[in-house]
Image (cartoon, helix red, strand yellow):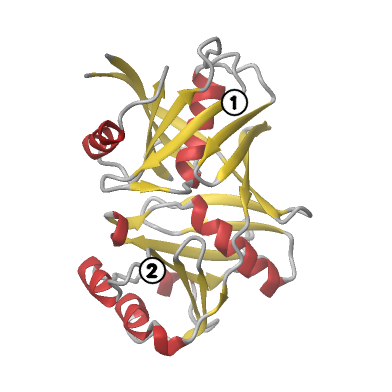
Amino acid sequence: MEIPVFTVDAFTNQAFKGNPAAVCLLPNVLRDELYQKIAAEMNLSETAFIVKLNSSDDFTSGSRFGLRWFTPMNEVTLCGHATLASAAVLFYHKKNQNAALVFETLSGELYARLHGDSIVMDFPLHKPVAQDPSEVKDTVNATVRGLSVQDLCYSAKTKKLLIRLSDSCDRSVLTSLQPNASDLLRSDSTGRIKGVIVTVKGAPTAQPGYDFFSRYFAPWYGIAEDPVTGSAHSVLAGYWSEKLGKERMLAFQCSDRGGELKLTLRSDGRVDISGQAVIILKGTLTL
């Protein structure tokens, strides 16, 4: 069996920036164990599998596909950058003729459309709620090591803890964080927390006008730090929209690779996450 595979840098217009994802095009479903083995072999934070839902469809004319995401360790229920990468393969490589694509996923139907030189994804919005600091003090300490924290929130749907550093902390403080993955894993072994978002207020008056910055750590999924995370921004969008009183925001995830996301909260309670992507590798898996 031969499977077309691509590596795509998502949330960037430059190769070797943003967040790399592997994308596999499948004519039909595989055994779950094979998905996991391929993802482990690709060894990126996510490998996406696009599956034809109808045998008569092809990747150029079809508008609806199945989509699953796997880390090297397990399957996840929502992944932004690998969805962006998947849409990029269909729009840019396969020259898909449709104005919009629909992906059937574990998080329901997700939509992607072209808008200028970007791809816009229609995602669920996961507004976090206030978190009692005493219940997560070990995880907070393992992440920010005594830095001043202004706010703590939690998203039960995504199992993400959001830590907002005090406004006295700027982007440089955020980028200097070096949490230890083993310490984070020890800080919560209950399964309640699967990822930690650390965020600071941005400087929208300074070019290019980022409303907030963030980083994301998910050793529970085998990812010490994810470079640019769409699913985390489904949480961040709800949080910062309320704090800033804005429905349109520009965000930057300041990992070593870095990536930019445009966010628009919608009247139907969802969020549009927009970004660019670059296909840097095309090949074939032979199984």
Is disc 2 placed on a helix, strand or loop?
A: loop
Residue 53 x/y as whole percent: 52, 22
Q: Residue furthest front?
A: 31
Q: Which residue lies furthest to the right in this view?
A: 267
Task: Identify residue for label 1.
Answer: 64
Please tell me which residue is depicted at 74% across the width and 65% down the height of the picture. Answer: 246
Instruction: Tell me the SS state at disc 1.
Output: strand
**162 above or below 18?**
below
Sort mark 2 into few (<14), some (14-19) or many (20+) by Cα contacts within 10 Å.
many
Q: Earlier in the sequence, mark 2 or mark 1?
A: 1
Q: Residue at x 52, y 64 (%)?
A: 213
Q: Position of residue 141 (x, y in %)?
A: 33, 83
CA gap between label 2 and label 1 equals 32 Å
Q: Is residue 71 left or right of residue 207?
A: left
Image quarter of the N terminus: top left
Question: Which residue corresponds to mark 2?
Answer: 193
Residue type of the residue flagged with mark 1: Arg
Q: What residue type is labelled 2?
A: Ile
Residue at the far bottom in the pictured view: 134
Count the marks. 2
Determine if residue 232 is in view.
Answer: yes
Q: Give how far across and how far down residue 58 sits, in percent.
A: 53, 13
Circle 1: is it few (<14), some (14-19), or many (20+) Cα within 10 Å? many
Residue 155: percent from left, percent from top: 52, 68
Q: Is residue 97 left or right of residue 175?
A: right
Give the position of the C terminus as an image quadrant: top left
Q: Is 266 left or right of 87, judged from the image as shown? A: right
> Looking at the image, which residue is at 48% across and 64% down?
214
Side of 255 relative to 31 (left or right)? right
Q: In this view, does 221 lie above or below 36?
A: below
